[in-house]
Image (cartoon, rainbow, N blue to C red):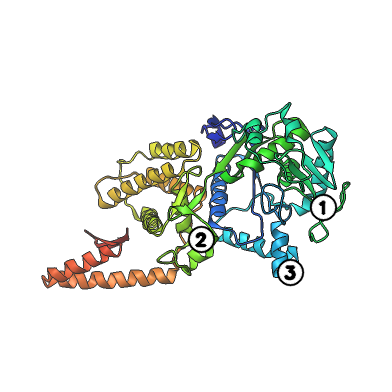
Amino acid sequence: MQLYKEQTLKIHNTLSNSKEIFQPINDGHVGMYVCGPTVYSNVHLGNCRTFMSFDMIFRYLKHLGYKVRFVRNITDAGHLENDADEGEDKIAKKARLEQIEPMEVVQRYTVDFHNTLQKFNFLHPSIEPTATGHIIEQIEIIKDILEKGYAYEINGSVYFDVVKFNETNDYGKLSGRKLEDMIANTRALTAQSDKKNPQDFALWKKAEQQHIMRWPSPWGDGFPGWHLECTAMSTKYLGESFDIHGGGMDLKFPHHECEIAQAEASNGKSPVKYWMHANMLTLNGKKMAKSTGNNILPNEMFSGENKILSKPFAPSIVRFFMMQAHYASILDLSNDALLASEKGFHKLMDSFATLDNLETGTISGFEVSEWKQKCYNAMNDDFNTPILIAQLFDAVKHINLIKEGTISITDKDKTQLQQYMNTFVFDILGLENNNSSDADSDKLSGTVDLLIQLRNEARSNKDFATSDKIRDQLAVLGIQLKDGKEGTTFSLS
C-alpha cells in the first residue's frame, strides 16, 4: 500500500484561506507548478527560500508514493519593470546596459540559478520550460480569449478586459480584493495608455522599434505578457486543471490572480485546486534590498565574502535554518540565527552518526513507532517542518540517553530509528552531511584525541586544574567530553 493511503495530508489553500485534506484530481498522481525565476540577475535568498519550500514539498509528496509531475518555469522574456505593463523588459534592459544579447543574459543567470540550487541539494523538477519556448502556445491562448470576448486589441497590443470578465466571474478571489475597491483606489489612466481600465493587463505588447525581444503575431511584432506564460506552460504540461500551484507571497496579486482570470476566460474552469504561497525572508529584521545594502547573495554566504555575517555558512546549514520556520511564515536571517542553526545542525548530524555504535538490549525506552508517526503528523499538517525538526531533536535526546546507558533500545527499534532519521533528515528535509571534508574531520579527531590523552595524563598526576581546564575549554568550543567505561569520547554540541 502506498503511504499516501495511510497518511492524511492537509494543505493550506490560499484560495479558500483554510487547511484542506489533500485529494489530487487523479488518484496517485500530482501535478504541481511553481513560478520560477526571471533570469536577469543572480538568484537571491528570498527566491531560494521559496524554491526550497517547494523542493521540500516535492520530496514529501514523492516519499508518500505519489507520482509527481513538477513543473518550474524559467522566465526569459516578457517580465517588465513594473506590474502596470510599463517600462522595459528586465532581461532586455540588462542586455542593453551590458551591450550583450538578451539570451547571453538568460544563459548567464540560468546557469547561476542551477548552480546555486545544486549547492542547496535541490531535486530537479520534472520539466523546466521557458517562456520563449512557448510563444506559439501563448498566441493561441490570446486568440481564444479574444474570441470569447474577454480581451481587446488596440494599436498592436492585446489587453485582458478585467471589468468584462468580472461580470460573470470573480476577479480578486485569490487575494481577497474586490474590483470595485480597486477601481475606486486607482488613479486615472494617462493619455499614453491604450487600456480601457487601469486593472486590465497585457496579454501581448507591441514591440517598439528599439525593443530587442520580439516575435511575429496576428497583431504585429511584439512579446507576450508576463502573466500569460505561466498559464500557457502549466496548461500544456499539467492540463486545464491541476493540483498545486505555488510561488512567493508577492506573486499572489497580480500575477496569480491574472493567471486564474486567463485560464477561466480561456477554458471556462478553475485552473488550480490548491494554491500555495511561501512567505518572505528578511535580513536583520528588515526587507532585503540592494539599494540599502541590506542584501546578501547565497554564494556570499557560502564564501564568507560579505560584511553582514561573521563567518562562512555551508549550504546545508542555511537550508537547515530555512527549514526551521514554516514555509508560510516570515523568516528573519541574522548572524546569530545562523550560528544557532549551525550548532543545532552539527548536534543532529553527530547524533545520527552515533546511532551506528549504539548497543542494543531486550527492551526499548523509546517508542520509535509513536515517534515516527509524530514526524508524519508534522509533515501532514501543511508541511510543518519546524515541528518535524522538534521531533528529530526529541530523537536526539533519546539517542543520548541510550548512549549514556540510561535507557535501552532493541535492535529492531534501532534499525527503524536509523531508517526514519535518514528519511526525514536527508530525503525529506534535503539536508546533506558534507560540510567538512574527511581530512578536516580526521584533523579534528586527532587534535581532540591528543587533548584527551593530555587530560588523562594530568588526571593521573592529580593535576585536576589542568584536566578541568582542557575539558572546560573544549566545551566552550562546542566539543563535549564524556567519560565512560570504555574511556573518554567526544561529541560536537
- 183 or 297, which lies in front? 183
Amino acid type, mark 1: Gly
Residue that badge 1 annotates: 222
Q: Report how many numbered discs are placed on residues in the image.
A: 3
Which of discs 3 and 2 lies nearer the camera? The answer is: 2
Which residue sits furthest top?
Answer: 168
Separation of residues labelled 1 and 3 (CA atoms): 20 Å
Could you tell me which secondary element the residue under label 2 belongs to? helix
Residue 46: x %, y % from top left: 54, 53
Can residue 240 be seen by looking at this rendering? no
Give the crowd class for mark 3: few <14, some 14-19, many >=20 residues within 10 Å: few
Residue 266: x %, y % from top left: 78, 35
Side (left or right) of 433 relative to 268: left
The residue located at (53%, 56%) in the rendering is: 45
Amino acid type, mark 3: Ile
Give the crowd class for mark 1: few <14, some 14-19, many >=20 residues within 10 Å: many
Number of the label disc, if any, that sits on residue 100? 3
The residue located at (79%, 59%) in the rendering is: 211
The residue located at (79%, 58%) in the rendering is: 213
Residue that badge 2 annotates: 292
Compare marks 3 and 2 and give the one earlier in the sequence: 3
- 101 or 365, which lies in front? 101
Number of the label disc, if any, that sits on residue 87? none
Q: Quadrant of residue 37?
A: bottom right
Name the quarter where the C terminus is drawn.
Answer: bottom left
Q: Quadrant of residue 108?
A: bottom right
Amino acid type, mark 2: Thr
Side (left or right) of 385 relative to 461: right
Could you tell me which secondary element the residue under label 3 belongs to? loop
Name the quarter where the N terminus is drawn.
Answer: top right
- 212 or 7, which lies in front? 212
